[in-house]
Each structure stands twice: as C-alpha cells, then as structure tokens.
Amino acid sequence: MILLIDWGNTNLKTICLETTDLETTGLEKFCRDSLLENEPRVYGSLAEFKENFSLSPQQVLVASVRSDEDNERLKQFLSTLSDEIFFAKTSHKACGVSCAYDKPEFLGVDRWLAILAAEAIADPVAVIDIGSAITLDVVSNKRHLGGHIIPGKRLMLESLKSTGKVRPDSQIVEDEQYLGQSTGDCVRLGIDAVVSGYLSNIMDKVSKDYQIERWFFAGGGGAHWYQKLANNERRFELRPLIVFEGLLRLYLDSKPKT
C-alpha cells in the first residue's frame, strides 16, 4: 500500500493506494484507475491524522506547504509507519519540465506538482487552484511559463475585518444575487465579483497571448468556479486530485532509471 499526503494551509488530505509495485503498474494507470476511484480523506490537523491513522504503508509520499517544524513532526510520526518516506520538493527541473522561477525553492510544492501533472497533457495548459490563495500557473512545451498569486476569498474577507471598520460574519455564501443589501452581503458579493473579474480577465489574456486552450481547476473552490465559468469556448476540466497526480509523477521520476 502507498500512502499519499497533501498537507496544505488548511487541511491534511490522504489517499491510500493498494499496490506493491508502482513502477510496474504504471503512472497513467494509477492516475486514472486508482487515484480517481479514491475519495481523499480530510483531516483538520496533524493531531487528528495521528490519532485516526493506523495503517502500515510500504511507501509514503508527501506534498507539504507547511513549515519545517511541522514537516519534521509529520516525518517523525510517519517513520513509525513506514521505512520509505518521500517528501516532494520544487527544483529547477523534474519530469522533463523546467521551472520558471530563478529560485525554485520559493515556488510552493503544491503548485510545482500541479505543473508536473498538467505537463502530462500534450496541449498547453493553465492550472487555477482556488483555496486560501488563488494561483495561476501556465505550462507549455515542458516549460513552466510563470503565473499569479492573489488572496483567496476568505483572506480578502479577513483582511477587511482586520481594519475594524467592516464586521461581516466569516461565513462565505455563494449567491446569484449581485448587489448586497447589508454590509455582510456587500462584502461577500463584492469579493465574489473581484474573483470572477480576475478569472475572466486572465482567461482572455492567457488564452490570447499564450495560446492556452485547456484550463484545469483545483483546490477547495475549484468546483464552484469550474461550474460557474464553464462554457463551450474553452476546455475546462475539474482536477481535484492534481497535486496527488503530480506527487506520483515526481516520485517515479526520482527513482533510479534502469
């Protein structure tokens, strides 16, 4: 069994895959047949994961954007479960794909893994991850061309609250209404308009300037915006497991070639 872990800013997600020979089984079969048949299990904290996970995987693959201290705590726990632990890291080049950053260590490993997964597609691709931050990455001809980072909806809301001038509740409600009639509604609908405008703008610009035809949506808010923006003019795909796909790809690429 292989345990895959995606530890983000909010949650720790896991998928367990039943296999003893990943190299022989093949990456594409894993991504399509095995990964997509599994619903990730979500833990709210490392403590919750440690309390509830008791299996003994042969291999553990980890994608984490947490601090070195958090990663060390996770590694110590995983060492009690498995002898083979792989932590993904961003690099100048992996899986034949080059990173746009001069200092790749500053590119979040979750973005890097999504880039590696996207490059498996023959067409130029843009990946939009909508979570605590909203990120864009463009990939073409085995090159990461660059991207964007902007605050996500909740970060925008918390930023307004921190001024002390606006006190909406923290609940973000998706609504077709466009104009708010209370402070809370005005804030939420305004933030929604900001995100919608940003996404529409980058799709027009990136499609035109970089000949991007395919768009992958990921992250906690990916499904909402995938459904809201989908049309017949662009090829949209919902890829909630794209970080896990890239994690498998990077792990295989790291193995000695025979």
Image: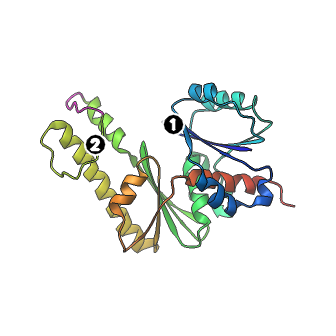
Neighbours of disc 2 within 10 Å: few (<14), some (14-19), many (20+): few
Q: Is residue 115 above or below residue 232?
A: above
What is the secondary structure assignment of the residue under circle 2? loop
Q: In 3D space, how far apart are the residues under numbered discs 1 and 2 (Cα atoms)?
A: 20 Å
From the viewer's perspective, tell me whether residue 185 is left or right of residue 233: left
- The answer, for residue 138, to whether it is visible in the render is yes
From the viewer's perspective, tell me whether residue 150 is left or right of residue 162: right
Q: Is residue 13 above or below residue 53?
A: below
Q: Quadrant of the C terminus?
A: bottom right
Query: Which mark is drawn over residue 11?
Result: 1
Identified by mark 2, the residue type is Val
Q: Which residue is mark 2?
A: 173
Please, what is the dominant secondary structure of the magenta stretch?
loop
Picture quadrant of residue 249: bottom right
Report the span colored magenta: 164-170
x, y percent for residue 222: 42, 53
